[in-house]
Image: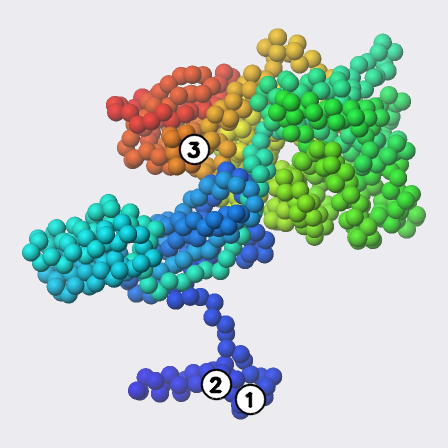
Amino acid sequence: MRSAIDFFSRYGHVVAKTAGSKDLPQAQRVAPAPMRVGRIPVLDLSPQLNDNMWPARAFAGEVVPFGATAFREGHDLIGVSLYLVAPDGTETVHPMTLAAPGTDRWKVDVLLPTQGRWTYRLRAYSDDLATWAHNAEIKIPAGIDVDLMFLIGEELLTSAARDTSRTAPERRVLQAAATTVADTAKPIALRLGALESDKLRAALHAHPIASLESFSSERTVIVERTRAGVGSWYEFFPRSEGAKRAADGSWTSGTFRTAAKRLPQVAAMGFDVLYLPPIHPIGAAFRKGPNNSLTVGPQDPGSPWAIGSADGGHDAIHPDLGTMADFSYFLGRARKVGLDVALDFALQASPDHPWVTEHPEWFTTLPDGTIAYAENPPKKYQDIYPINFDNDPAGIRAEALRILRHWIALGVTIFRVDNPHTKPLDFWEWLIHEVNAEHPDVVFLAEAFTRPALMQALGKVGFQQSYTYFTWRNTKKELEEFLHGLATATADFLRPNLFVNTPDILTEYLQFGGPAAFKIRAALAAMAAPTWGMYAGFELLENVARMGAEENIDNEKYEYRPRDWAGAEALGASLAPYITRLNRIRSEHPALRQLRNLDIHASDDDSILVFSKYLSAEFTGTGADDAIIVVANVDPHSVRETTVHLDVTRFGLEPGATYDVNDLITGATYTWSADNFVRLDAFTEPVHILRVLGRKPGKARA
């Protein structure tokens, strides 16, 4: 009684205010706090974004880790289950396990096979039988409350056996266990052993003996089509494919018809998405010449991103490329060889775009009466006017939606969006939602080389894919941090597309690293993420940069660039066979088509990067586990010898196991263990891509 009096004397004034005391004015009364947890708290659900501000996202066929923090007071044991509802309304229950002892973090991995809106909630409960078993295994052998403990166990099992919501076979198994536990004629060990029955465990797996159940609130996961998360992208300029130069220096542009001839070779390399830079009319005003110069000749085609001329704007095709019929022919040829075509969606205009005269309010007019052109100091884009999204938001939104509907109607379902980080975030949230509500198969890739918060926010509001900082992450330390983050911290909303180069990006690593650098970057991109890409010319080891710029000299953005593909392969000067091998490995190994399963391992060398990707037989669809180990020498100028240290449990083996690995590049087979000697020569084969064949007795060797 004394303690209650002390408590009230100390805290009674707080209780009175919370209850809305009549002694206080109405404005000062505090309403009782709402109850936000159940009898057993279930907190920190995943996947979810920003306290459920947006739905988490996955792609069809992705293995998604579901998790939550759940606990109860005292020492009684709990259980947690995932209740998952598919788009067709089917509900499945997935028992969860503790991620690690003492963490109170529960998890379960589930493959989401179908596109649509999935919902989930978590159920936590007091696991009464597990609590009894834990106590019984301690007290009964010690001779403490033996009869009482067996009586409690019998009552729990008997009560469960009477539960008519269980199946008849389950009830019989439970009753048999209750009878054994209650049989005083049997040895104590045998009575306790009734809990070890496989049949009993199976009966309790989905329907444990539980009380005090508590459900979390509901969360949503939007599952998009597989191409939203898995693909190999290839970029080329259709005007260069088939372009011809006459003796007088004049050019004839390639067309959709000539570019279509290149499609079988792109597909043969294993690519499944072909990305085209803008295919629209190009303005003449302030047109850029070779290497981004302001000096323009009559034959200079200009940058495709300077969109719009008297021939039309974003819904038109450049006359040099052909007609709408020619574009439809191109799409048909691409589909025939298994390629999706991705179009560039660049919301900007050349000074000659019809918008400039029809909608001058869509641009920023400076005090001197001129329209502001695009800048990214020190870069200047005098041939491009950026859109001002605040002058007429409704008009701009309607036009953007009209343009996308136009191309979707022609059969385009993928758009690479130029510089989305220079447009308002709420614009993209609205536009992508509108398009995907009508066309859920449409995929948007954000070309967002920008600050992390903005890049990640673009993913949260709807972009299915994003460019990343991959091209600038080249050291072992940089890559370890970068790849781990992609697989964990941002995986619920940002799907990386690891392009190895672009028309604007030729890093110093590629400029000075020789053929090894190109092999290393291609292997890392293709193995580390389910989506990767390259721009034409990469396979030809094009590495000469324009002075003072991080881009190729004679940049294809500003001129025609036909290439002798067949000649290069005949001379052995093409990486096309190596890239074909990488894409074939991706297609044959489902572990490589997942994002969240990447694990970093250790090596004794600062330039040897090691990671694995593993998918258990439960999810591969082949009946066998799939495990790949990548060991890469990221220094393209050296030969490295070192020891790599593997946590073999991360790819399905037991500690201490030895196992065979097969190098999918060279064909060599080795027997490995947790610690293995490697030698990687950057000038021959700088990367091991190893398939784990399985456990093998015997001594490990390098």
Judging by the rendered image, the residue that carries numbered circle 1 is 24
| Residue closest to the eye, 81 or 374 | 81
How is this picture coloured? Answer: rainbow
Find disc 2 in the rendering and name its residue. Answer: 16
Q: Amino acid at mark 3?
A: Thr
Question: Along the polypeptide, which appears first: circle 1 or circle 2?
Answer: 2
Q: Earlier in the sequence, mark 1 or mark 3?
A: 1
Callouts 1 and 2 close, C-beta under 8 Å:
yes
Q: Residue at x 53, y 91 (%)?
A: 23
Residue 391: x %, y % from top left: 83, 53
In this view, the mark in front (1 or 3): 3
Give the camera-side residue of 51 and 607.
51
Q: Nearer the viewer, residue 373 or 46?
A: 46
What amino acid type should be assigned to the residue bearing mark 1? Answer: Leu
Q: Quadrant of the C terminus?
A: top left
Please rate how many residues cluster around mark 3, counting C-alpha atoms within 10 Å: few if below 14, some from 14 to 19, many from 20.
some
Q: Which residue is mark 3?
A: 620
**Residue that protrudes farthest toward the bottom in the picture:** 23
